[in-house]
Image (cartoon, helix red, strand yellow):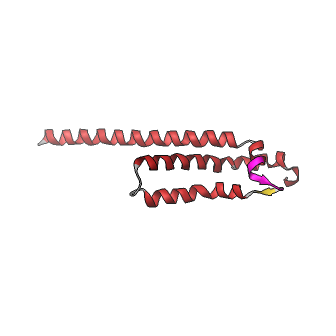
Amino acid sequence: MSNTLDNNNALTAAASRAFFRSVYTYMFGALGISGIIAYTAGTPEFMNTYFISNGGISPLFWVVIFAPVGLGLLIQMAYNKLSLGVLTLLFIAYSALMGLSLSTIFLVYAMEQLHPHFS
């Protein structure tokens, strides 16, 4: 009986390690995607081209800010109905949108450079 419990505990521990390794691998990849996109899109040229229009904030800015929330809700509501491939693509899209959304933080620091009258 004790030997069976030890085998079950070993299998459970191995399954837990494999599960968490998988989760951390996906999260590391998603953070990498978000970070690279945020760094790339966080330039004054990108901000001025896509997020600033006619001296104000463009509609694309608002889409980029709120799209991760909508996509997160979609993933949460439909994860039982979607295939693993579709969920993976949605997760990659979510991490890319989060990178774009986080790149807008650089807008605060670049605002003085883009439009000196905002200071």
Q: Nearer the viewer, residue 16 or 98?
A: 98
Q: Is residue 40 left or right of residue 85?
A: right
On-image quarter of the N terminus? top left
- At horizontal 60% and vertical 49% (from top left) the residue drawn is 97
- Locate residue 44, reporting x and y percent: 77, 43
Q: Is residue 35 left or right of residue 17?
A: right
Verify whether residue 63 appears in magenta. no
- Locate residue 10, reporting x and y percent: 24, 38
Q: Nearer the viewer, residue 9 or 88?
A: 88
Q: Is residue 34 left or right of residue 56?
A: left
Identify the magenta region.
49-54
- At horizontal 78% and vertical 47% (from top left) the residue drawn is 48
Residue reaching furthest left? 1
Is 55 located above or below residue 17 in the figure? below
- Locate residue 35, reporting x and y percent: 61, 41
- At horizontal 19% and vertical 38% (from top left) the residue drawn is 7
Q: Quadrant of residue 45?
A: top right
